[in-house]
Amino acid sequence: MDKLSTERRSANMRQIKSKDTAPELLLRQSLHRSGYRFRLHRKDLSGKPDLVFPSRRKVIFVHGCFWHQHPGCREGRVPGSRRDYWEPKLLRNQQRDSAAQTALGERGWNELTVWECELGKDIRSTVERVVEFLASPHS
């Protein structure tokens, strides 16, 4: 595998979006087709959830496997180079995710995380899982 120059890698990283990602759009389209309506990225909620269902008090995060370190996923691993940079950065992401989930729970919101790889492998079963989450009574 060819090594990327520092400039090229930096340009690649700048292109990565934090919202309206392909996995997020895929889930949004599927849920919208199923009749669900939602709000996007509410800034007043911890973690700015990707999908917010206010009347149900439920939120969904669509996480990238790499950025949020999906346990057991091939994509959720720390790069071999510059580990001193990547490990703390990715750990901060996980800590921020955990803090957001806790804060949402304390405010009476239920949270579901959908991983990027789940949408790539089997969108149908992932959407079914989300629909079950949305249909379940608020706890």
Image (cartoon, rainbow, N blue to C red):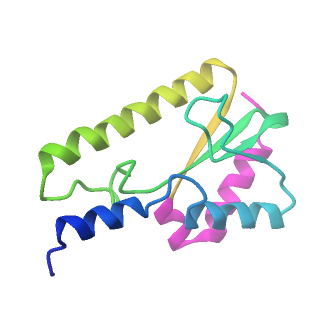
Give above or below for 43 relative to 113.
above
The answer to whether 91 is drawn above or below residue 115 in the figure is above
Q: x and y percent of residue 132 in the render?
A: 73, 50
Tell which of 71 and 60 is nearer to you. 60
Q: Quick one: 29 or 134, which is closer to the camera?
A: 29
Give the residue furthest to the front.
7
What residue sits 61% from the left and 59% below the top? Answer: 20
Q: Quadrant of residue 101?
A: top right
- Residue at the limit of the structure toward the top, as seen here: 106
Give the magenta-colored segment's residue range.
116-139
**133 falls in the magenta region:** yes
Residue 70 placement (x, y as % from top left)? 38, 52
Quadrant for the C terminus in the image: top right
Examine the image and state in which quarter residue 92 appears.
top left
What's the residue at 33%, 66% (across, down)?
Answer: 11
**Residue at the image position 61 percent from the left and 26 percent from the top:** 104
Residue 21 in the figure: left or right of residue 92:
right
In which quarter of the view is residue 128 placed?
A: bottom right
Say which residue appears at 81% left-offset and 62% top-offset.
32
